[in-house]
Amino acid sequence: MHRNPMTGTTERTGPTRSARVRRAPTRALVGVLAAAALALPTTGALAQSDVDSSEVVLASLGDATVTLEAFELRFEAAVRSTLAQQGVEPDAETVAGFEAQRPVFLEQLGQELVLSAHAEELGIAAGDAEVDAVVEQAREEHGADLDAALAEIGFGSTADFETAVRRSLNAQRVVEALRAEVEVDPAAIEAWYEANPDQVTGPDGPVPLEEVREPIADLLAGEHVEARVAELVAESGIETHPERL
């Protein structure tokens, strides 16, 4: 199972002998884009309008908001990052191919707001010292070029970056807390194994259950966490406005 970086959905590729857990890069700037659970798609073609994009609110939860300006910056940066990872040169055609992902990206940013607020409610939100440490790591890495580096990944200022770091860390903590609550029933693992023979067959035939029990458990736990996150979003009262994109 892996998460599609553009859609944010989980694709089930099936546990096999060759399955490996791949972790996102830990560098400060890249980490924010990958975290938050929250993967960032991207587009270079910004919507043209006479409206002040800093005044247009696309998502709101209490005092926390996502403006059109912030959305466009992070969406563009994420698109370019995705294209770079694919070895594709960004141009008008390749960037336009991500246009349909804009509402999905907004949904992901809204989810991040919800999870960050939930971290506060649970008392597990990241402290100022932790956020400052991430910013300082970025500063040490980029030095005088920090502002330019932040702009490249969609942040207009250090303050914007700090806000994103805090939300990302908070969201990650909630996901980890939800995962820790999950106890996968061994019978459910066995049932999945029996129901998905095509997913547990390698070059030499069916892989023994014991060799794929753990990845199947992770897959099922991930489904549970996704469902719980969806419930939190539904219960949160968050307002999103994809029609303003």
Image: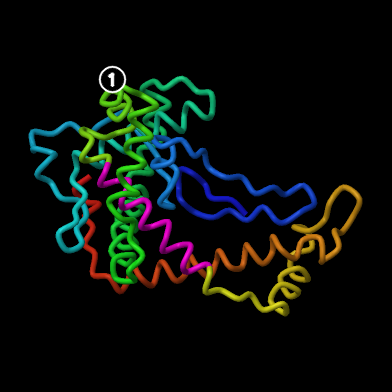
In the rendered image, the quadrant that contains the C terminus is top left
Which amino acid type corresponds to the residue marked 1 in the rendered image? Answer: Ala
Residue depicted at 62% across the width and 62% down the height: 219
Q: Which residue is drawn at 72% across and 49% down?
A: 19
Horizontal placement of 229 versus 179: left or right? Answer: left
The one nearer the camera, 146 or 3, is 146
Magenta-colored segment: predominant secondary structure: helix
Query: Helix, strand or loop at disc 1?
Result: helix
Q: Within the image, what quadrant is residue 185 found in?
A: bottom right
**147 to the left or right of 224:** left
Count the marks.
Answer: 1
Q: In this view, does 150 lie above or below 100?
A: above
Q: Where is residue 14 in the image (x, y as percent from the top left)?
A: 70, 56
Q: Does the magenta stretch include residue 124?
A: no
Q: In which quarter of the image is residue 48?
A: top left
Q: Is residue 169 magenta?
A: yes
Residue 184 x/y as whole percent = 63, 75
Question: What residue is pinned by disc 1?
Answer: 144
Say which quarter of the image contains residue 113.
bottom left
Q: Which of the two residues, 82 or 152, is positioned nearer the viewer here?
A: 152
Name the residue at 76% across, 74% down.
190
Evaluate whether residue 27 shows in this view: yes
Residue 82: % across, % down: 46, 33
Q: In this view, does 74 lie above or below 3?
A: above
Residue furthest to the front in view is: 129
Residue 13 spot, x, y in % from top left:
67, 52
For the residue pair 19 and 105, the one nearer the viewer reads as: 19
Q: Can residue 106 be seen in this view?
A: no
What crowding class fits label 1: few (fewer than 14 Cα within 10 Å), some (14-19), or many (20 or more)?
few
State which region is magenta: 162-179
